[in-house]
Amino acid sequence: MSELAELEHQAEQKQLTGLSLMLCDRMLLVPNTAVAELVAWQAPDALPGGVQKDGLIGRISWRGLQLPLVSFEVLAGEDEPEAGGQTRIAIFNSLDPAAGAGFYGVILQGIPRSLQLDSHLQADSQAELRNGELQAVQVEGQCMYIPDLEGIEQGLLRARLQQRF
C-alpha cells in the first residue's frame, strides 16, 4: 500500500497518527508505522560510483545490517546536507520487504514529532513538489510533503541490482 493510500486509509478510520520529519528546508509527513527507529547520526560509508541523483548517499550499519542511506535533498537535486548537532537518521520500514530492502535510512535535521491528524488532510495546491514527493498538505497551518516511498524503494532496488550497495 502506498504511503498516500496508508494515510488515506488511516484517515478513513479516523485514527490518523503521523510523524513530521524535518529536512533542511521542508517537512515530510509519513504514517508513524513507516519509521522503525530513530538513530544518532553516523557518517555513511561511501558507495561505488559516489552520490547520484537517486538520493542514495552511502551505507550505514544498523543492528548488524548494512542499510542504504537516502537524502531527500540529494533526490531533489540539491547538495548533500551537512551533518550538524540535530542531524539524525530515521530507519524506515520497507513497504515491500520481499524486494530485498527490508529497511533503509533517511537523513533528518531534527527529531520527528508525532501528530494526531483529523480525517481530512487538506491538499496544498500552491506548494511546488520536488522529486520524491507525492503531495503537499496543510497540517496545523504548515505545509508538509508526503514522500513517494514506493518510488524511493524502487530506486533503491535498482541501485542494489547495479551493486551500488
Image (cartoon, helix red, strand yellow):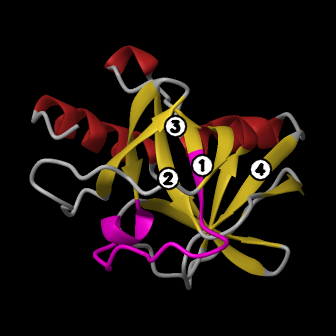
Residue type, mark 2 in image: Val
Q: Residue 33: name its quadrant.
A: top right
Q: Position of residue 155 (x, y in %)?
A: 26, 44
Relative to 158, residue 64 above or below: above
- Total number of numbered discs in the rendering: 4
Relative to 23, residue 2 above or below: above
Q: CA distance from mark 4 to mark 3?
A: 15 Å
The secondary structure type at the circle numbered 4 is strand
Name which of mark 3 and mark 2 comes first in the sequence. Answer: 3
Between circles 4 and 1, the one closer to the viewer is 1
- Residue 135 included in the magenta stretch of the image: no
Q: Which residue is mark 1?
A: 90
Residue type, mark 3 in image: Ser
Q: Which mark is residue 106?
A: 2
Tell me if 47 is positioned left or right of 13 in this view: left
Q: Residues within 10 Å of mark 3 (few under 14, many from 20)?
A: few
Q: Which mark is residue 18?
A: 4
Q: CA distance from mark 4 to mark 2?
A: 16 Å
Q: Residue furthest top?
A: 98
Q: Which residue is mark 3?
A: 2
Q: Which residues are magenta?
A: 71-90
Between circles 4 and 3, the one closer to the viewer is 4
Q: Are marks 1 and 2 in contact (CB under 8 Å)?
A: yes
Tell me if 145 is positioned left or right of 115 in this view: left
Name which of mark 4 and mark 2 comes first in the sequence. Answer: 4
Between circles 1 and 3, the one closer to the viewer is 1
Tell me if 13 is positioned left or right of 106 in this view: right
